[in-house]
Image (cartoon, grey):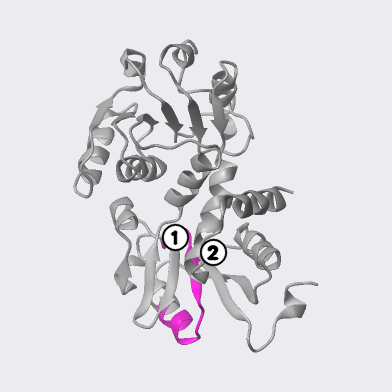
Amino acid sequence: MNVIDSVTGKTSVYGIIGDPVSHSFSPVIHNTIAKAVDLDFVYVPFHVRGGDTLNAVRGAYSLGVRGLNVTVPHKKDVIPHLCGIEKRAEAIGAVNTLKYTENGYFGYNTDILGMLYSFQNRGIYIKNKRVLIIGAGGSACAALVLAASEGAREIFVANRTIENALKLKEHVLRYYDANVSVCGIDEIYDIERCDIVIQTTVLGFGEKQGISPVSDISFFSSKGISAAFDVIYIPEKTKFLEDAQSFGITIINGFDMLIYQAVAASEIWLDLTYDEQMKENLKKILKH
């Protein structure tokens, strides 16, 4: 049955706000989840221009929209208009998921959960591990908050501009007590050991396809690395991941994060907890 044909007066409405928003893959993902879990909701895109965030939030709440995803340019602008915000979203400084409550919308950032579920699905856990994060942008911030909140033993942040890595470290340490060091990209080879590497730069995507931030691939064989994660999902396997896989390292690309952040949003909205098998089934359905 087509989702639109199944809408009734009892159907709950969810959606995404952004500018632009017509390209978003989120309606496909969430309407597919609705069918898969056999729940009566529909998910639609709302084009909200920059500067109209407050009106959009008030209007959606008045109309009873049960939950919203938030994309550019509203991830930061939406925060003052919420009744509250989850700690990890506050530490990241951006919100991408709103849940309807009796006091207003409450904000979350499910990118971090998407990353966490991607690891857990492969039996990889961050607690007491040494984690290297490459990059110092928004995705790196989510990765650092994840590593800190999950109890990593030691965290390294490597970036071309060390000042940006230092700013990121200082920001996150306001929220979490963690052992964080920073270094330049060329200094990662001096790290004695790391268990997990998370690549968050644009190297490997678009015009930079075929390029990896790790120029000396012997790095993958000399540090005890068990898992390599790349936030990029097009191409499916970047040079960074190809090089890691060539040494028998478990690799994860950004597609899992894309899917699992949506699954996490669904759990938040519906007050559900999907077991690992359901998460895997949803990923397979959505990948197809």
Identify the magenta region. 57-74
- Answer few, some or many: residues within 10 Å of disc 2's Cα (few below 14, many 20 plus, some between 14 and 19): many
Amino acid type at image mark 2: Ser
Image-quadrant location for residue 182:
top left
Residue 18: in sight, yes or no? no
Mark nearer the N terminus (1 vs 2): 1
Closer to the camera, 178 or 216? 178
Question: Which residue occupies 56% across, 55% down?
Answer: 275
Q: Where is the N terminus found, in terms of image quarters?
A: bottom right
Closer to the camera, 198 or 77? 198
Closer to the camera, 117 or 47? 117
- Answer few, some or many: residues within 10 Å of disc 1's Cα (few below 14, many 20 plus, some between 14 and 19): many
**Residue 266 numbered mark, or none:** 2
Q: CA distance from mark 1 to mark 2?
A: 12 Å
Q: Please state the horizontal and vertical placement of residue 280, each as a whole percent of the image.
A: 63, 48
Query: Circle 1 sits on which residue?
Result: 96
Residue 196: in sight, yes or no? yes
Amino acid type at image mark 1: Asn
